[in-house]
Amino acid sequence: MDKNAFLRKIPKVDLLIEYEEIKELINNSDRELVVDIIREKTEELRNFILTSDSSISEDEISQKIDNLIDDISMKVGKITQLNVRKVINATGTILHTNLGRAVISEKIANRLKEIVTGYSNLEYDIEAGERGERYSHFEDIVCRITGAEAAMAVNNNAAAVMLILSTMAKDKEVIVSRGELVEIGGSFRVPDVMSQSGSKLVEIGTTNKTHLRDYENAINEETNAILKVHTSNYKIVGFTEDVSIKELSELSKKHNIPLIEDIGSGVLIDLSKYGLSYEPTVQESIKNGADVVCFSGDKLLGGPQAGIIVGKKEYISKMKKNPLTRAMRIDKFTATALEAVFHEYINEENAIKNIPVLKMITEDISELEAHAGYLYYKIKDIHELAEINIEDCFSQIGGGSLPLERIKSRCVSIKPKNITTALFEKRLRNFDVVIRISDDKAILDMRTVKKSELDILANSIVGALLFA
C-alpha cells in the first residue's frame, strides 16, 4: 500500500474552503469553527492512513477520503445544533427517567416563560421592600396541602435526604431497616448518601422482616434519628413485615428522637380511588407522626425535579441555615414551577385534570381508543409496507414509582414488511420518536402521546417506513 499516494489525495484546507458545501457551512455557522473542524477531520484522516495495516483495504481508505466533506458537515451540524430537544414518548412509560420524567403542563410552562423572561421577586419581599426567601413563594401552599408546619426544597430527593441527615444527625447514629436500604437511579444508594451526610448508619432487621423491637433495641445515647425509606421502586412480597410510621412515631416520642421519612414518589392524592394500588401520601405521613418528610418533585407529584422537605418548623429552620442548602438550592425555574404545581392540588379534580402525569394515569380507555383510531386512519394507506393494528396493551408508571402497576391501554402496533422492526425503531428515533418493541412488533402506546402529537407521529411513521 502506497500511503503517501493516499495522503496526497487529501485536499488542503484552503482548497476545502472553496467547496460549495463548505461555503454553505461557513455562511450558516461560523468560519473559524468550520476551519477548525476541517483541520481536525483532515488530521484524523491522515492518522488513519498512517496507522493503517494490512487489515485495512485500499477501498476503505478511498471511501474515507471520499466521505471527508460529509464527515466535516456532520461534525459541524452536531456542534451547532441544540442537543436537548423534544421527543414523542410512545413507550407508555409515564415517568420515563431517560425522557425527563414528569411532563409540565402548558399552563405552567406559560407561567415559567412569564417569570424567567424578565425580573421577578425570587428573593425580594415586595411588601417589606427588603431581601426575601425563595421558599416563601410556595411554603404556605405546601404546608396547607400536606399539613406540615414548614417546607423547603432542594435540587433533588437524594440532596434532600443528605441535607436532612447532615442537619439532624451529623456524626450521630441513624437507625434504618435493612429492607429499606434502597438503590435509586444512577446507582445512588441510601447508605452512600447517608455516609456523605456525615451520619452513621445503624442497620436493623432483615431484608424481608423488621420488627418494632429491632428499632427499640438499637436506640442508645448516640442515636439521633430514625429514618424510614418508602420502597417506592420495588416491592418485597410474601413472608414480610415492617413497622408503620404511626408505630415508629410513638417510639420516637418515647425516646425523644426525631422520625424522618423518605417517601420517594411524593403522592398527594390517594390513587387507589382511580384503580391503582394504594400508595401512602405525604399528608398521611405527616398526620401519622413523621417529624420530617422528603419526596421527589418530578415523580407522582407531577412537577419539576426537586427534593421537597416538609415537617416540623424547628427542623426545617435549621436546614435552611445549613451551608449545604446554598449548594443544593433550587433556581427560579423550579421555585416558580413548584408553586404553580402545588396550587393545582388545592382542588383534587383540578389536579387530576391539569397535571399531565395524573391525567395520563387516569385517562379513560375510550380516549386512548380514539387516539389510536385517529393514528391508524392517518397511516392506513401504507399497509403494503407494514401490518398495522390497534391492540390492547399495558402502560406503566415508571420513574421508580408503583413498580408492579400496569395500566390497561390501547396501542397501534406496526410490523414492517420490508425492513426489520429494529431498523424501523431506529429510524423512528431519527424522527425523535421513542417506542417499545414487543413480539417483534413496534408498539406505540397512546397513553403517553398527546393528541397534538398524533399528526407529527403519523408523518414520522410514514417517513421511517419509506426512507432509509
Image: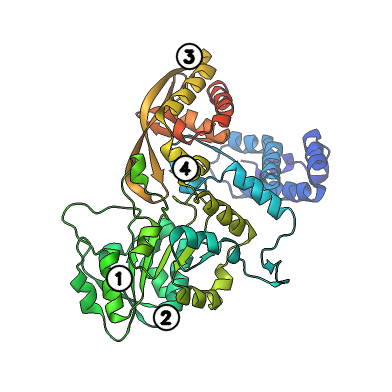
Q: For this view, does 315 lie left or right of residue 175?
A: right
Q: Residues within 10 Å of mark 3 (few under 14, many from 20)?
A: few
Q: Residues within 10 Å of mark 1 (few under 14, many from 20)?
A: many
Residue occupied by mark 3:
383
Can residue 16 be seen here? no
User: Helix, strand or loop at disc 1?
Assistant: helix
Instruction: Work out whether 416 lies above or below 222.
Output: above
Residue 80 marker: none
What residue lies at 83% left-to-right and 44% top-to-bottom? Answer: 14
Residue 289 percent across, percent down from the top left? 34, 68
Going from N to C along the chain, the mark reached first, 1 or 2, is 2
Nearer the viewer's eye, disc 2 or disc 4? 4
**Number of numbered tags placed on the structure image:** 4
Nearer the viewer's eye, disc 1 or disc 2? 1
What residue lies at 81% left-to-right and 42% top-to-bottom? Answer: 26
Nearer the viewer's eye, disc 3 or disc 1? 1
Q: Residues within 10 Å of mark 2 (few under 14, many from 20)?
A: many
Labelled pair 1, 2 in contact (Cβ < 8 Å): no
Labelled pair 3, 4 in contact (Cβ < 8 Å): no
Residues under labels 1 and 2: Cα distance? 21 Å
Picture quadrant where residue 193 is located? bottom left
Residue occupied by mark 4:
349
Going from N to C along the chain, the mark reached first, 2 or 3, is 2
Residues under labels 2 and 3: Cα distance? 65 Å
Residue 217 percent across, percent down from the top left? 20, 78
